[in-house]
Image (cartoon, helix red, strand yellow):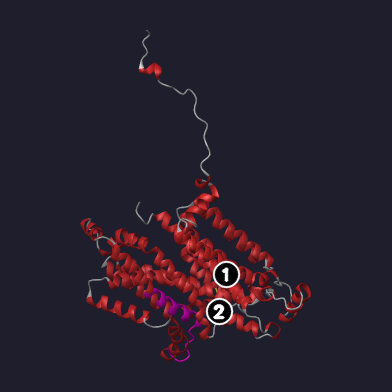
């Protein structure tokens, strides 16, 4: 009898089994549908209701969009084309009004021969924002700069820009794109100067005005350096005072005298010529850039231990939040002139920007205060244990964490403020939603047009606001807000 061990009786597979396809329910579109749309009775019911709503909307509006007319000179001509093409009783959109009046929706009443200036200003805005918004992602920064450069130069070429202006714009934008590849940090200098460049391009006038504004900053820096030997706090106050005194008392006269001696400038454009998305984006960008630092200061003031500072911050924030924005706009438009010296010409767009900034800053302060309150007490104690003073602790430890937490709220405030720029129509400015649309309807050829301007304006607002929302999500992922 032969002896066999357990090892001899065991079965050993010498080849691997071929891979089997996963079950149908666990792969592909079926798995996605089961997990996302039909994962349970409630989800299935909601999916069916959603599909019914989509079907109702598509079946109700499809013919209106499908029969749309893009080339006509009036609403009556649109209706004739639709009736001749699709039969009597057919309906359709008349987007020919957008084709004919797009320039007013984009630029308002800006002189057509100067359209290149807002285009170049917005192109340079992307150059100024790229090193700030995409400071750590070279690939995205490169894409933004290249696309902005190509789009700006292409539109300038289509609009028939003068050769000198086109060449200047090409040199600046291509140079900035090349500079971003080698020394992206140097573009921050351009970002700091952009507010003066943008204002000069949009409003025009003498070149000495922005240069004198820069001179005021230089005087402030000189004052800060001279007084810093005595006291750092006094140095800051002296620098701010010297800058403000120069700006308020001497900038206008100095720029006028220098313009008489050596004229340099471009054609001025009055604020009444602004309108459409040019006006909305100008107010929105200025409000966003100014309301964030103001909101941070207000949030810190409200959490201050000093009674007077806290009280003033609380009164300001609660008062502004308790008043509708349209009330502040009426104050900027009507009442503010009563408090200014006779003969003072305070630009209406500047007044609106100030009020919109104040309104947004009050909400921003509460959003950032929520971020400050969410930080553990240990973070404040850690800053104290390192021996940091108040401002260093806020700048290096507290605010970076609080702002990361507050990103969704901050971006929501920005989006809301940008959409609220349409309220400027109530103070006589031509916003793209109502002001320009009413002006277009005043023409007999387009009298009766209604939904098409709203759809066009709403689509552009959606693109801009959705882009801001997506950037917020990108920023949250980059900063790892959840501290994983």
- 210 sits left or right of 476 in the view: right
* Label 1 residue SS: helix
Q: Is residue 201 magenta?
A: no
Q: Position of residue 262 (x, y in %)?
A: 56, 74
Residue situated furthest front in the rendering: 1
Q: Is residue 350 magenta?
A: yes
* Label 2 residue SS: loop
80 w.r.t. 43: above or below = below
Which span of residues is magenta-colored? 340-362
- 459 sits left or right of 7 in the view: right
Residue 262 appears in view = no
**Magenta stretch mostly in which secondary structure?**
helix
* Residue beneath disc 1: 460
- 19 sits left or right of 479 in the view: right
345 w.r.t. 129: above or below = below
Mark in front: 2 vs 1: 1
Assess disc 1: are there few (<14), some (14-19) or many (≥20) residues with their C-alpha within 10 Å of its C-alpha: few
Residue 278 appears in view = yes
Q: Residue at x 63, y 62 (%)?
A: 153
Q: Position of residue 183 (x, y in %)?
A: 48, 52
* Residue beneath disc 2: 431
- 46 sits left or right of 106 in the view: left
Assess disc 2: are there few (<14), some (14-19) or many (≥20) residues with their C-alpha within 10 Å of its C-alpha: many
301 w.r.t. 14: above or below = below
Q: Residue at x 26, y 68 (%)?
A: 231
Q: Quadrant of residue 122?
A: bottom right
């Amino acid at each position: 009898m032969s002896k066999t061990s357990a090892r001899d009786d065991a079965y050993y597979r010498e080849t691997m089994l071929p891979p089997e396809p996963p079950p149908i329910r666990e792969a592909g579109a079926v798995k996605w549908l089961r997990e996302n749309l039909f994962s349970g009775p409630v989800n299935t019911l909601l999916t069916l209701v959603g599909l019914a709503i989509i079907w109702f909307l598509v079946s109700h509006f499809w013919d209106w969009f499908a029969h749309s007319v893009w080339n006509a000179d009036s609403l009556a001509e649109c209706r004739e084309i639709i009736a001749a093409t699709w039969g009597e009783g057919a309906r359709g959109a008349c987007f020919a009004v957008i084709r004919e009046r797009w320039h007013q929706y984009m630029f308002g009443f800006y002189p057509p021969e100067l359209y290149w200036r807002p285009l170049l200003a917005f192109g340079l805005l992307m150059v100024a924002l790229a090193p700030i918004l995409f400071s750590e992602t070279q690939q995205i920064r490169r894409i933004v700069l290249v696309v902005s450069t190509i789009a700006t130069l292409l539109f300038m070429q289509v609009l028939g820009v003068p050769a000198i202006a086109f060449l200047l714009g090409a040199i600046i934008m291509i140079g900035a794109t090349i500079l971003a590849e080698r020394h992206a940090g140097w573009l921050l200098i351009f970002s700091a100067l952009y507010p003066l460049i943008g204002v000069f391009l949009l409003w025009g006038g003498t070149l000495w005005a922005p240069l004198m504004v820069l001179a005021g900053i230089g005087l402030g820096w000189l004052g800060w350096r001279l007084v810093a030997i005595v006291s750092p706090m006094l140095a800051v106050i002296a620098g701010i005072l010297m800058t403000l005194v120069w700006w308020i008392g001497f900038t206008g006269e100095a720029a006028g005298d220098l313009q008489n001696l050596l004229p340099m400038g471009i054609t001025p454009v009055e604020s009444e010529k602004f309108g459409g998305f040019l006006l909305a984006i100008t107010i929105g960008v200025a409000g966003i850039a100014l309301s964030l630092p103001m909101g941070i200061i207000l949030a810190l003031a409200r959490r201050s231990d000093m009674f007077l500072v806290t009280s003033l911050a609380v009164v300001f924030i609660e008062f502004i939040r308790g008043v509708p924005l349209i009330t502040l706009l009426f104050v900027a438009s009507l009442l503010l002139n009563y408090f200014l010296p006779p003969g003072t010409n305070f630009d209406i767009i500047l007044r609106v920007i100030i009020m919109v900034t104040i309104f947004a800053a009050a909400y921003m302060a509460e959003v950032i205060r929520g971020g400050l309150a969410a930080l553990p007490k240990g973070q404040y104690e850690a800053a104290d244990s390192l021996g940091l003073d108040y401002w260093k602790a806020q700048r290096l430890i507290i605010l970076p964490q609080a702002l990361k937490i507050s990103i969704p709220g901050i971006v929501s405030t920005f989006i809301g403020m940008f959409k609220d720029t349409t309220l400027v129509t109530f103070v006589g400015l031509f916003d793209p939603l109502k002001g320009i649309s009413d002006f277009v309807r005043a023409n007999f050829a387009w009298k009766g047009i209604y939904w098409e301007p709203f759809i066009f304006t709403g689509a552009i607002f959606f693109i801009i606001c959705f882009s801001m929302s997506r950037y917020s999500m990108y920023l949250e992922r980059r900063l790892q807000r959840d501290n994983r």
